[in-house]
Image: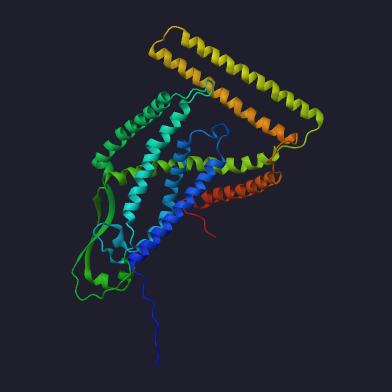
Amino acid sequence: ARHTLAMAAPSYEALGILNLLFLLIGVLILLAVNTYVVWQWRHPEDRNEWFSAKLIVVLSMLASELVIIGLPLDVTNNQGSRDCSWEGGDYAKCGGLDMRGYWVGVSWLQMACALCLLPGFLFAYEAYDDVDHTTECGSLVKGGLCSVLAILIVFVSVCVPMYLSSEMNAVRRPVVAYTGTLGTVQTYSNTNMSSFAAMGDLDEAVTSSSSEYLFYSVDFLDYATRLFSWLGWFLFVLWGGIGLVSLPVDYVLAYIYRPIPLDARELADLRLSVQRRTAELLDLGRQLQGERAAYKEGPKLGWLARRRHEAADQVRVNKLSQMAMILEGDVEELEICSGNAKDYEPLLYVLYLFMGIIAAIHSLLWFLHIAIYILPREPAHP
């Protein structure tokens, strides 16, 4: 007797549990990678500070990555069934995960990071005084909360009226309405309207057709998500266009201006230049501290004059920070040229040159693609 072994198809509940397990593993891996990236490239002065801000950066990176891993997860869970994408569908062939709930949660998390968490911690970090090294909790919390409140007011005043407007929220979808009588028509599955018409049944059943529009509205979360996506495309085009040119140029310049060994005289001149600029930077810092002390002891100014003084003071602090950043780069170059650097890798600059050449070729091909296939009315074909 012959026995046939048949493997039972996995239940959709078990498939949902398996997808959930893969999702949790992916989230843990991404959290580990994001934490390593943030910790590895942190500023040396913030080594043991601002752990809450680092946590928010890790969370914001995860919110962006959840969109990427959610696409294959959605396809695997829903098995390509349209019924899984709307509330009234037949969920018999859908996976065990509620993907609509997943996308709603990811959308809310991204909005919270973009509107509240990141701006709040960013302005709180800016409220930290680099000159006096003051970290009063009240000023930091005040700066963060005021910035978040201002951003929310702008978002609500712009997004809510647009959502309530019938012209801005109404989605217009062009459709074709067919009129006729159906007799005995053969049914075809998994086919579209063009193949159905090619079989000859549509010409016999349809007597007339007209072009119409289907109007429908979306909920606030979908509207806000699409508004963010629409604004994000402008930022993507802006930074993408800048990156097409700046990325290869920066890599090639990093190789051209790489640190090279210096003789004793050149090394001494570089060391004296760094010492002189360090002394000048310290004098500017003491001068700024003296001006602040005189301002605190002087007469109180009005609101407008005080705001002008604070704005001018912030400009001086930013210039001082920029000078300090340039000086840090020169000190690092001095350590490399003098042979005292511990983590210097000469082959890294060769890798920069290779990546610059690859990036230049990619940018050139992208420009050619735009010029050949996008800009002309009739795209050129081989």
**Quarter of the rendering containing residue 340:** top right
Q: Quadrant of the C terminus?
A: bottom right
Q: Return the residue found at the far top.
A: 299
Q: On screen, 156 above or below 184? A: above
Tell me residue 27's x, y (percent). Answer: 44, 52
**Quarter of the rendering containing residue 185:** bottom left
Question: Foreground residue, 376 or 319?
Answer: 319
Residue drawn at x 34%, y 56% is 99
Question: Foreground residue, 167 or 271?
Answer: 271
Q: On screen, 103 above or below 276? A: below
Q: Return the residue found at the far right.
A: 264
Q: On screen, 10 above or below 341? A: below
In screen coordinates, is 258 left or right of 188? right
Tell me residue 282's x, y (percent). Answer: 62, 19
Residue drawn at x 23%, y 61% is 209
Asked whether residue 102 is in view, the answer is: yes
Residue drawn at x 54%, y 20% is 316
In screen coordinates, is 243 left or right of 356? left
Tell me residue 294's x, y (percent). Answer: 50, 9
In screen coordinates, is 350 left or right of 198? right
Asked whether residue 226 is in view, the answer is: no
Q: Return the residue found at the far bottom.
A: 1
Tell me residue 312's x, y (percent). Answer: 49, 17
Q: Quadrant of the N terminus?
A: bottom left
